[in-house]
Image (cartoon, rainbow, N blue to C red):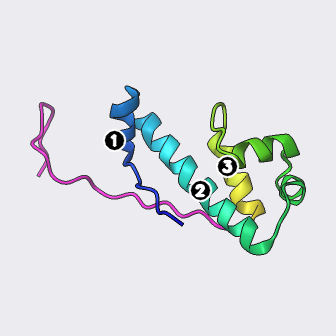
């Protein structure tokens, strides 16, 4: 299987002319959904079973897992993560130091 090139949230935002926060949200959703898809294949879960476990309609599960991210909330994606028996973990880190612009300087 050919490996797809991943795009950073900033690159996605630039390419689509959207705010960086929306680019980050789209990338997060896509990564979480990719993990759910891998897990349901590994465990041989059906969309019906995932829908039952998540409390989402089967049609919504099928749409989300097929890549339709329009109007999909992060809450729904996380419900699928949990229904697949997975746990999401988020890492937040400090951005590289950049020159400060205005504002108070604390020491």
Residue at figure coordinates x 87%, y 46% from the top left: 58
Q: Main secondary structure of the magenta part?
A: loop
Residue drawn where x is 82% and y is 54% of the image = 54
Residue at numbered disc 1:
10
Which of the numbered marks, if any, corresponds to residue 21? Answer: none
Q: Is residue 103 left or right of residue 35?
A: left
Q: Hey, which quadrant is residue 11 in on the image?
A: top left
In this rendering, position of residue 64 left or right of residue 58: left
Mark 1 to mark 3 CA distance (whole Å): 21 Å
Discs 3, 2 touching: Cβ within 8 Å = yes
Q: Based on the displayed image, in which of its 4 quarters is residue 87 positioned?
A: bottom right
Residue neighbourhood size for the residue with mark 3, other residues' Cα within 10 Å, grouped as few (<14), some (14–19), many (≥20): many
Q: Which residues are magenta?
A: 85-107
* Disc number for residue 32: 2
Residue 20 picture location, percent across and down: 37, 35
Q: Residues within 10 Å of mark 2 (few under 14, many from 20)?
A: some
Asked if residue 85 can be seen in this view, the reply is no
- Residue 38 in magenta? no
Q: Earlier in the sequence, mark 3 or mark 2?
A: 2
Asked which secondary structure carries label 2, the reply is: helix
Q: Is residue 1 above or below residue 8?
A: below
Q: Position of residue 30 (x, y in %)?
A: 56, 49
Tell me, yes or no, if residue 4 can be seen here.
Answer: yes
The residue indicated by pointer 3 is 77
Can residue 104 be found in the magenta stretch? yes
What residue do we see at 19% from left, 54% from top?
96
Where is residue 50? Give x, y as percent: 83, 58
Residue at figure coordinates x 37%, y 26% from the top left: 17
50 relative position to 34: left or right: right
Hey, which quadrant is residue 86 in on the image? bottom right
């Amino acid at each position: 299987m050919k490996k797809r090139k991943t795009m950073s949230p900033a690159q996605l935002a630039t390419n689509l002319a959207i705010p960086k926060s929306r680019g980050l949200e789209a990338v997060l959703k896509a990564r979480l959904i990719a993990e759910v898809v891998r897990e349901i294949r590994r465990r041989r879960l059906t969309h019906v079973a995932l829908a039952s476990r998540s409390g989402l309609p089967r049609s919504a599960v099928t749409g989300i897992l097929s890549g339709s991210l329009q109007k999909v909330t992060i809450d729904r994606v996380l419900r699928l993560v949990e229904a697949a028996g997975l746990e999401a973990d988020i890492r937040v880190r400090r951005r590289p130091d950049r020159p400060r612009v205005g504002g108070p300087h604390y020491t």
